Amino acid sequence: MSAVAEAWSAALPEIRNGVTGRATWNALNVAKPLAIENGVLVLGLEHKDRELIGHLNAAAVRRLIESEVGSRVGQTLSVRIIDGTTPADWERAKRKDQEAERLRDEAREKMKAELQAKSNWETVYEQLSRSFGAMQNKTLPQNRAKFLEEAIQTVVETRQQITERDDLSERNFARCLERVAQYTEVPAGVIAHMVMTRTGEF
């Protein structure tokens, strides 16, 4: 018998004494100790007994299991209940955990990139407003031409820095293009073409 099975077998009578209810007793009786890894006691239930998981996950029952088994193995434990009663089932659960964590990491990175892109475009948008506000003789075409060149360069540099080209990023990019178009009275499509030509998108 493995160490985890021995600890579970030794702790089970005390755990039963501390709980009430036939369903909870049934859950304890059919639960299979599979492993203790990284401070986690893994208990498995066969698929047909899945409805009993809630009884094992009850806070009072979990604390009792953690305390009784933990005292016998000499470490602080938390309980994890999985679907399945074999080591292969535990390995499958761990693979699912890894995949879920990978997807969470991807989602966090995407959100981070989106926020960064939004922040960058917000900065450009405000910078364009400040630059135009500080420009002297705004009605002179030559001054508007200078502003246009500086604005396009600013937008190009930001466009090149942002690699996440999702819908949010594209909308913020368009917002800046429209701001340049508004200030220079050059069509937004022309501004977009000038920027995207310089960024190599055409």
Image (cartoon, rainbow, N blue to C red):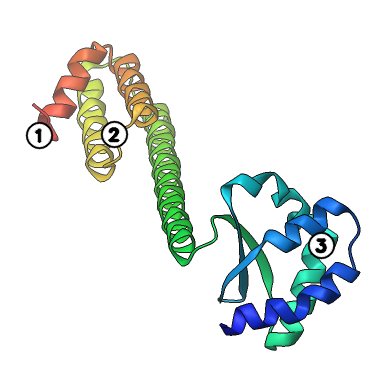
**Quarter of the view holding residue 19:** bottom right
| Residue 20 pos. (x, y %) | 91, 58
Say which amino acid is labelled 2: Arg
Residue at horizontal 40%, vertical 31%?
A: 125
Tell me the quadrant of the picture where the N terminus can be found.
bottom right
Mark 3 to mark 1 CA distance (whole Å): 63 Å
Secondary-structure class at tag 2:
loop
Q: Mark 2 points at which residue?
A: 165
Q: Is residue 112 above or below residue 68?
A: above
| Chain-order first, disc 2 or disc 3 | 3
Kindly report which numbered mark, 3 or 1, lies closer to the viewer in this rendering: 3
**Quarter of the view holding residue 60:** bottom right
| Residue 35 pos. (x, y %) | 56, 73
Q: Mark 1 points at which residue?
A: 200
Residue at horizontal 19%, vertical 30%?
A: 149
Q: Give 189 or 77, whichever is nearer the viewer.
A: 77
| Chain-order first, disc 3 or disc 1 | 3
Tell me the quadrant of the picture where the C terminus can be found.
top left
Q: Are marks 1 and 2 in contact (CB under 8 Å)?
A: no
| Chain-order first, disc 1 or disc 2 | 2
Mark 1 to mark 2 CA distance (whole Å): 15 Å
Q: Name the residue under label 3.
A: 61
